[in-house]
Image (cartoon, rainbow, N blue to C red):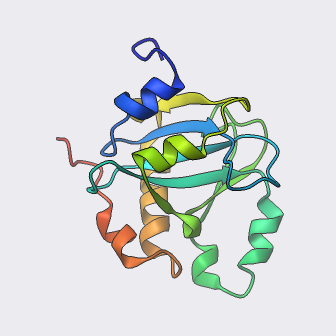
Amino acid sequence: MAKYKSFNDFIRNGCNEKEFFCIKFADNRHLHKTHPHYYFCVPNNLRNCFLLVMITSQVEKKRKLYINNEKAQKSLIYVDDTNLSFLKKESVIDCNEAEMLMRDELFNICVPRRGREIVCFDNNIQIGIKLAIINGIKNSPIVKPYIKNSILPLNHTQ
């Protein structure tokens, strides 16, 4: 985070909607979630909008949620510390709950006193994870078409 003064500086001025990155924050819209979660930001073509997918350790809960929807089950990406070193236990990325937020919305939902951090940038995220997230969102039967259509291909900057 050396080139950013703070998490706030990163969200307000530094982060780019056209790059993958991972952040951690507690979402003030979910008062029942008492601790911060990790979120991947997925590159998209909507200016000042961020496409987020959450990583949760509630693996069994997510499996049960989509038990009768095989296609939605395929949009769950199971991860652990072997492919995301910052994780402490088996977790799941639920691509069915991909969410688009404006920069100000993202800034406003981050609870200040609950541990906010920039976890990793594009070049520190395995290509396999990036592809799995993109495919999970695009193949989800739940995600809205405008979100699916906004996703940039991985080679968009090359």
In the image: residue 97, left or right of residue 43 = right
In the rendered image, the vertical position of residue 17 relative to residue 139, given as above or below = above
Of 110 and 71, nearer the camera is: 110
In the rendered image, the vertical position of residue 40 relative to residue 122, given as above or below = below
Q: Position of residue 7 (x, y in %)?
A: 52, 26
* Residue drawn at 34 percent across, 45 percent down: 17
* Residue drawn at 49 percent across, 50 percent down: 105
* Residue drawn at 55 percent across, 55 percent down: 53
Q: Position of residue 20 (x, y in %)?
A: 40, 42
* Residue drawn at 50 percent across, 46 percent down: 106
Of 74 and 17, nearer the camera is: 17
In the image: residue 84, left or right of residue 101 = right
Q: Position of residue 91 (x, y in %)?
A: 72, 51
Which quadrant, please, contains the C terminus?
top left
Q: Residue furthest bottom?
A: 68
Quadrant in which residue 36 is drawn = top right
